[in-house]
Image: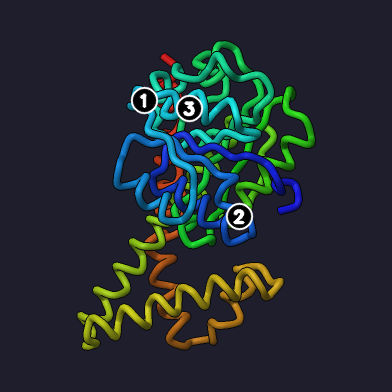
């Protein structure tokens, strides 16, 4: 976190993703008074104030509530509002940008589109996080154009790493794949866990027991894949005894083209990500 030490960080929008990032930053030793959040919700501002974080009401009429204050005094500005309202939100402070690093976590909104909203401002990094960032177990894809300095790239990576893993992509279009592989992917795993619980109940377990076993197994399998140093395919092979119960289950999945189903779902996600990006650009 040395890159962020003493830096002023302003969040435009204080919803779940912003709060996840803020929680990670606080957990890594960033001082609350170095963070400012502009959000119209009184409830959100009250939650943040209880953590000693500076807040701004962008709908207020006083000088201290002017969102330009949050932007002008910042070293880093994190745009954490819905892409559909981004144009209106950034209009309140675009003219005070001159040196700040802007990080956008708005899904589907390209850096070119955002730059136009900001009057041609170029110092933008785009991030595609996922919801496990809320427990500092997230995975975030990052993209920066050629105008971003190495110092600012490191600054962006450090900030997003407060909520989990970060990975840079070379082409902005690759963020569609990031969306398919990690951005939307927690829902895939939740769906699988959900289905396993239902199957366990049908096979005679009570729901609480089936849920505990399925969720712990998902956690353990993921941790093994991360720490073992072996490819998932090899881990699968090792646990699949010839003619055993696991082999029977795997063969059933293969017969139903489980891999094809996953690929088809991820392609649908990728395609929709492209469509949303185009819609926001129009």
Name the residue that disc number 3 marks: 109
Q: Residue at x 58, y 54 (%)?
A: 25
**Marks 3 and 2, how far apart in space?**
23 Å
Give 140 or 75, whichever is nearer the viewer: 75
| Lower sequence index among marks 3 and 2 | 3
The quarter of the displayed image where residue 7 is located: top right
Give 150 or 169, whichever is nearer the viewer: 150
| Lower sequence index among marks 2 and 1 | 1
Give 57 or 82, whichever is nearer the viewer: 57
| Left or right of 163 on screen, residue 37 | left
Crowding at label 3, few (<14), some or many (≥20) Cα neighbours within 10 Å?
many
**Marks 1 and 3, how far apart in space?**
11 Å
Q: Secondary structure at mark 2?
A: loop
| Left or right of 41 on screen, residue 114 | right
| Lower sequence index among marks 1 and 3 | 1
Q: Residue at x 53, y 13 (%)?
A: 116
The quarter of the displayed image where residue 236 is located: bottom right
189 up-or-down from 20: above or below: below
Name the residue that disc number 1 marks: 85
Tell whether label 2 touches label 3 (CB within 8 Å). no
Residue 123: x, y in percent?
66, 24
244 up-or-down from 186: above or below: below
| Left or right of 261 on screen, residue 76 | right
Name the residue that disc number 2 marks: 162
Crowding at label 2, few (<14), some or many (≥20) Cα neighbours within 10 Å?
many
Tell whether label 3 touches label 1 (CB within 8 Å). no
222 up-or-down from 106: above or below: below
């Amino acid at each position: 976190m040395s890159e962020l030490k003493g830096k002023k960080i302003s969040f435009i929008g204080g919803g779940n993703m912003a709060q996840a990032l803020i929680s990670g930053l606080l957990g890594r030793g960033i001082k609350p008074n170095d963070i400012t959040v502009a959000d119209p919700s009184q409830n959100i501002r009250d939650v943040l104030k209880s953590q000693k974080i500076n807040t701004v009401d962008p709908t207020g009429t006083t000088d201290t509530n002017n969102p330009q204050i949050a932007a002008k005094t910042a070293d880093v500005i994190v745009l954490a509002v819905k892409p559909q309202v981004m144009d209106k939100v950034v209009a309140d402070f675009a003219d005070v940008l001159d040196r700040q690093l802007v990080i956008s976590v708005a899904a589907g909104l390209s850096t070119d589109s955002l730059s136009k909203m900001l009057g041609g401002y170029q110092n933008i990094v785009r991030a595609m996080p996922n919801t496990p960032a809320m427990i500092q177990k997230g995975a975030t894809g990052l993209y920066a154009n050629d105008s971003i300095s190495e110092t600012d790239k490191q600054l962006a990576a450090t900030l997003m790493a407060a909520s989990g893993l970060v990975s840079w992509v070379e082409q902005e279009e690759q963020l569609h794949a990031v969306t398919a592989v990690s951005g939307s992917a927690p829902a895939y795993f939740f769906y699988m866990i959900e289905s396993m619980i239902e199957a366990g109940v049908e096979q005679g377990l009570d729901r609480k027991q089936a849920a505990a076993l399925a969720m712990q197994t998902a956690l353990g399998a993921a941790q093994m894949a991360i720490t073992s140093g072996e490819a998932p395919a090899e881990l699968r092979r090792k646990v699949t005894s010839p003619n055993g119960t696991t082999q029977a289950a795997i063969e059933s999945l293969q017969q139903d083209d489980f891999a094809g189903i996953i690929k088809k779902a991820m392609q649908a996600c990728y395609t929709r990500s492209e469509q949303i990006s185009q819609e926001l650009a129009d």
